[in-house]
Image (cartoon, helix red, strand yellow):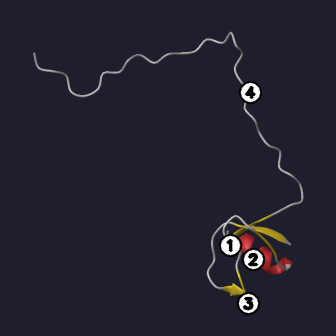
Amino acid sequence: MKVRMKVAMSGTRNGEDWPPKGELADLPTGEAQHLVAAGIAEEVTDEVPEVETAAAPPEDAETAVAPAAKRGRPRKE
């Protein structure tokens, strides 16, 4: 079972260092399920996640302008 490490783990597994945070590990199902249940890793599926993109506003869209803010203390007159 493939998992993505959510944390950096010290030590080794079968004589090899654990993958760094964010990297993949291919582990036996039982071991992988324990790491996922503990929040140390997340299951990786073969599906490619859909990438969300932002749309640009229309060219004729109005934009708001913040009023000039006065900073600091008011002056004594």
Q: Which mark is residue 38?
A: 1
Q: What x and y, as percent, mark residue 38? A: 68, 72
Label 2: which residue?
34
Kindly identify which residue carries mark 4: 55
Element under label 3?
loop
Quick one: label 3, few (<14), some, or many (20+) residues within 10 Å?
Answer: few
Distance of mark 1 from mark 2, alpha carbons? 6 Å
Amino acid at dot 3: Gly
Q: Position of residue 14 (x, y in %)?
A: 76, 89
Q: Position of residue 55 (x, y in %)?
A: 74, 27
Query: Which of the two labelled residues, at mark 3 and mark 2, occupies the earlier sequence position?
Result: 3
Give the mark nearer the N terminus: 3 vs 1. 3
Q: Are marks 4 and 3 in contact (CB under 8 Å)?
A: no
Kindly report the distance in space between the C-alpha atoms of the residues bearing marks 1 and 4. 38 Å
Left or right: residue 70 versus residue 27 is left
Tag 1 near tag 4, CB within 8 Å: no
* Name of the residue lying farthest toward the top: 60
Place residue 74 in its image quadrant.
Answer: top left
> Which mark, residue 15?
3
Mark 2 closeness class: few <14, some 14–19, many ≥20 residues within 10 Å: few
Q: Are marks 1 and 2 in contact (CB under 8 Å)?
A: yes
